[in-house]
Amino acid sequence: MNSNDTPQTPHAYVGMWVTADGFIRQELLPNGRYDEARGNRRSAYTGRYTVTGSHLDYVDDTGFTATGDVRDGVLFHEHLVLYREDDPRAGQGASS
């Protein structure tokens, strides 16, 4: 599972997650990487993540670590609450 050469089946959490105000946009990529934008700052944080059940462990490219949990379709990432991009609760002002 740790080999970059072995294709992985994407898990259910792959995709774009957005805060209610649209300021933070976190994309969970199928290759175990994430890319988080904040406001107009693209790739403000990038790194890798692993999923165990509904729990996510993040390691930023700078070495910073964080955790998250998905409950009832909502991603609780440290102090953030993120919704699927197509969820009506997700920020309508988000821009790419």
Image (cartoon, helix red, strand yellow):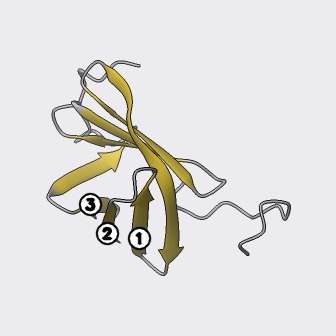
* Left or right: where 44 falls relative to 30: left
The x and y percentages for residue 95 are 34, 18
| Amino acid type at mark 3 | His
Residue nearest the observer in this picture, 16 or 4: 4
State the SS at label 3.
strand
Which mark is on residue 57?
1
Looking at the rendered image, the quarter that the C terminus falls into is top left
How busy is the neighbourhood of tag 1: few (under 14 within 10 Å), some, or many (20 plus)? some
Q: Who's the residue at 56% across and 52% down the image?
A: 33
Question: Which picture quadrant has residue 46?
Answer: top left
Q: Who's the residue at 23% across and 20% down the image?
A: 93
* Left or right: where 20 falls relative to 63: left
Mark 1 or mark 3: whose residue is earlier in sequence = 1
The x and y percentages for residue 53 are 48, 81
| Amino acid type at mark 1 | Asp
Q: Where is mark 2, residue-wise?
A: 67
- The mark tally for this picture is 3
Say if 81 sits above or below 6 in the image. above
Gap in angstroms between the C-alphas marked 2 and 1: 5 Å
Say if 79 sits above or below 69 in the image. above
